[in-house]
Amino acid sequence: MSQKEGLRANSFQFTLEGEPFRILGGSIHYFRVPRAYWEDRLLKMRACGVNTLTTYVPWNLHEPERGVFNFQDQLDLKAYISLAAELGLWVILRPGPYICAEWDLGGLPSWLLRDKNMKLRTTYPGFTEAVNSFFDTLIPIIKPLQFKEGGPIIAVQVENEYGSYAKDEHYMPFIKEALLSRGTNELLLTSDNREGLKCGGVDGVLKTVNLQRLAYGTIQYLAYMQPQKPLLVMEYWSGWFDVWSESHHVFPAEDMLAVVSQILEPGVSINLYMFHGGTSFGFMNGAVANLGTYKPQVGSYDYDAPLSEAGDYTTKYQLLRNLFSQFHSEKLPEVPSLQARRVYEPVIIQQHLSLWESLQFTEKPLKSEEPVNMENLPVNSNNGQSYGYTLYETTIRRGGLLNSKKNVKDRALVFVDRHFVGVLDYKSVEFALPDGKGERTLSLLVENCGRVNYGKALDDQRKGLVGDIVLNHVPLKDFTIYCLDMKPNFLKRLSAASQWNSVPQKPSFPGFFQGMLYVDGHPRDTFIRLPGWSKGVVFINGQNLGRHWSIGPQKTLYLPGPWLKSGNNQIIVFEEQKADDKLVFVENPDHGKTIDVYKYPFCVLL
């Protein structure tokens, strides 16, 4: 039997199995969707007329500690790609190692930053050795899933938007060879915005482009750079991401449809980024550093995409389905029914445990003369701390002016003898500590709000205290440092603690607040809302749902039904400064006040 050809880019039109083929793609990230819902979301994608699934691969989830790999359960990449094949979807895989994706450090593991000389996304030996080790594990998993082996993978992307970084001309050839030498044998492509096209490519690899509006002749520029090749908009931004303290970005459905129609009309292929955004659960959100201003992203990755965060159909979905149906000779599959939702009774907070009481459940604290950034703490088998909070404590003998020297990354609550006295962050770098008698304990609870995922500042994403803090111009010394990454084992020890008490009239902050959600019957999706609370993290049955912050825009947290069980479900809220006596549930999300994406300067910049 003759071997059928995979995806080819030998003329103006893609071919697959020797026949003309137009990519109608959509991005859904398996790591942002509960595994129980993978099939639901992919079926909805197929019913919209999409023929190709694209996904990134987050290195920092798959190798959380150096040499420790996880491709199980929620991270079972093989199962996800195989499911796509069963449902009739082709796959374009985007394995990085850098993925951007509004994901902490663009998917790169934080333990890379333990090396003070690390140069990410270059041929610096410390980086290439780590990439080689990761690819040695990753590529054998995906190799049998390629088209040539009978699988659905028809193309593989080489890195991601390197033209916007472009620090090492030898780097992209290295990544290309790292893929090829391990048996990647499908069509290779790169992906860049218009400016990045100038220096983001690599010999023998198809260039593709990322955009939202058809300004600046971007597609024509791609055709000029790469004549007699098929054109692919690898990321057509169907919406946009959100950052804390700003508005929820929307891209009107009619505007989006008009651009998609214009892209498709001359025969260009497209991939919708995102088709379904999902949720950056836990502490995995990224951040932007635009024009020197740090802004962490929210946990919801709704993205104003055709399928909402919880998998609901939108106007965009219906319009795209009508459009895409014109490119299919057969009738599209029926649209799957929606997941039922439920508004549970409010959960009354019953128990409280102060942050200070919880310290006994952390790993052994480090004693250090100098402050140590979280990545270089001797925790997690000497891989350092990746996410969450780090507590730094030292002794002071006087009050005066406390100055962070801009070494707080990203936000610190400051306490004297465990009484809150102020905040240090990017905007507030100093304040006066009150005078007092004798020795007092100064505590700084520093939060990693999310590492920057895009731009040239990746090497500078160490978190915690990254240098000296000074009191009256004198550097503070002799710290006790606690890792509060709030991982499942910590939550287990915390849950079993005998120190929990009923909630006092004036509870201590920061603190952990516990309540029980009773589910009668089959668990359903819902959204948690926290009116009267200030800022913190929500855990359900030991799983980290993500951050809540009253400054918005995000006002609700998506709670997937599969994360619940019939009967009692434990909810723990870590709260920094202000709590109510209950949590409430609502049927629909509240993403906050909205703004048209094109009024947001960072999008225009891209």
Image (cartoon, rainbow, N blue to C red):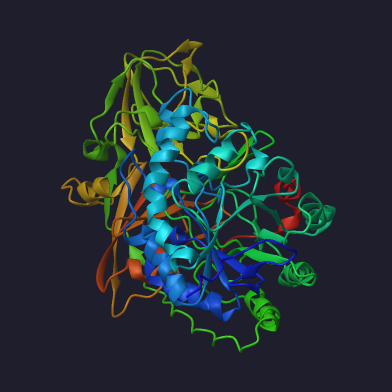
Side of 255 relative to 338 (left or right): right
* Residue at 18% over, 47% down: 497
The answer to whether residue 457 is above or below residue 193 is: above
Observer-nearest residue: 597 or 75?
A: 75
Residue 502 seen anywhere in this rendered image of the structure: yes
Side of 564 relative to 584 (left or right): left
Residue 499 at x, y = what percent? 18, 45
The answer to whether residue 242 is above or below residue 393 is: below
The answer to whether residue 162 is above or below residue 276 is: above
Q: In the displayed image of the protein, which residue is found farthest to the top?
A: 474
Residue 588 at x, y = what percent? 51, 71
Residue 106 at x, y = what percent? 52, 44
Side of 499 relative to 96 (left or right): left
* Residue at 46% over, 60% down: 32
* Residue at 29% over, 55% down: 542
The answer to whether residue 101 is above or below residue 337 is: above
Residue 505 seen anywhere in this rendered image of the structure: no
* Residue at 38% over, 75% down: 524
Q: Quadrant of residue 203?
A: top right
Q: Quadrant of residue 351?
A: bottom left
Side of 210 relative to 297 (left or right): right
